[in-house]
Amino acid sequence: MTRQLDEQIAGRFPVGQRLRVLDVGMGQGTQALRLLRAGHRVTGLERDARMLSAAHEALAAEPEGVRERMRIIEGDGRDTGVHFLPGSFDVVLCHGVLMYVEEPDPLVAGLARMLAPGGLLSLLVRNGDALAMRPGLSGDWRSALAAFDTTAYTNRLGLEVRADRLEALTATLAGIGAPLHAWYGVRVLTDTVPDGTPPPAAEDELSALLAAEERAGRTDPYRRVAALLHLCGVRG
């Protein structure tokens, strides 16, 4: 997904432009720190105390020139209008958040309002059109059958959450003035790999794995059955 995001940023903004980035649900700050190191100004929004602590700790290890371009705010992605003025950002990230929100449309609309004209909205969501894949490939036939007619599922943390369908999110983005520009599949071929499995030790094997995932995430029909979808909308 990192390569996909970089591709979209490079294709939309002049080389060397220092972008204003909002990372909603930034977690421990992995993506935010990567964009900071690339020279951008990043605001991270996170409500989980443990994630906030981890993000502050990670930021503290960065050089002062990087730290001074980062702002971390404790808060909820549904309250962006409280913290920021409309049009304040060039890029808004919301990765791995919508599955925890019962009604995602107001949140997505609020994120789009934060974008300046031509700004990029990057969403990472659970693919509601492929919920049967993981249990089916694992031989859990009852769960696979039940997954066809719902967008609700239990994630790997044991939490009851929800997924989004590509068609519905495409309509939402069009309706809020940030129509879908590009989309990718994420975790197409590796979704059933058990948590904690180390990556291949051999460099050529790891390169082949990443190349196969990248190719599958851009190619139909494979990307349509990915565990996650990465959608990029552009503010009109």
Image: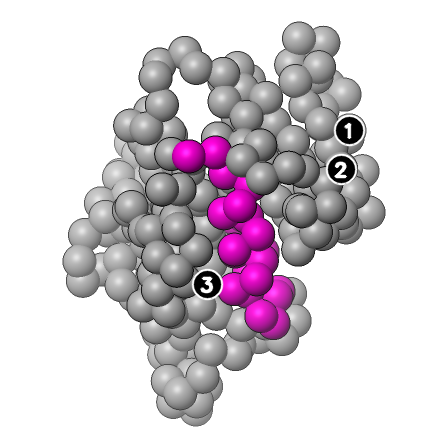
Mark 2–mark 1 distance (CA, rounded to whole Å): 14 Å
Decide which of tag 2 and tag 1 comes sooner along the chain.
1
Amino acid type, residue under disc 1 in the picture: Glu
Q: Which residues are magenta?
A: 94-117
Decide which of tag 3 and tag 2 comes sooner along the chain.
2
Tell me the crowding category of disc 2: few under 14, some 14 to 19, or many 20 or more residues within 10 angstroms, Cα based: some
Disc number lying in front (2 or 1)? 2
Q: Is residue 161 left or right of residue 148?
A: right
Secondary-structure class at tag 3: strand
Where does label 2 land, which residue? 73
**Nearer-the-camera pick, 154 or 199:** 154
Quick check: is 224 in the magenta stretch?
no
Amino acid type, residue under disc 3 in the picture: Arg
Disc number lying in front (3 or 2)? 2
Where does label 1 land, which residue? 57
Where does label 3 land, which residue? 126
Q: Is residue 18 left or right of residue 73?
A: left
Tell me the crowding category of disc 3: few under 14, some 14 to 19, or many 20 or more residues within 10 angstroms, Cα based: many
Secondary-structure class at tag 1: helix
Whether 145 is drawn above or below 111: the answer is below
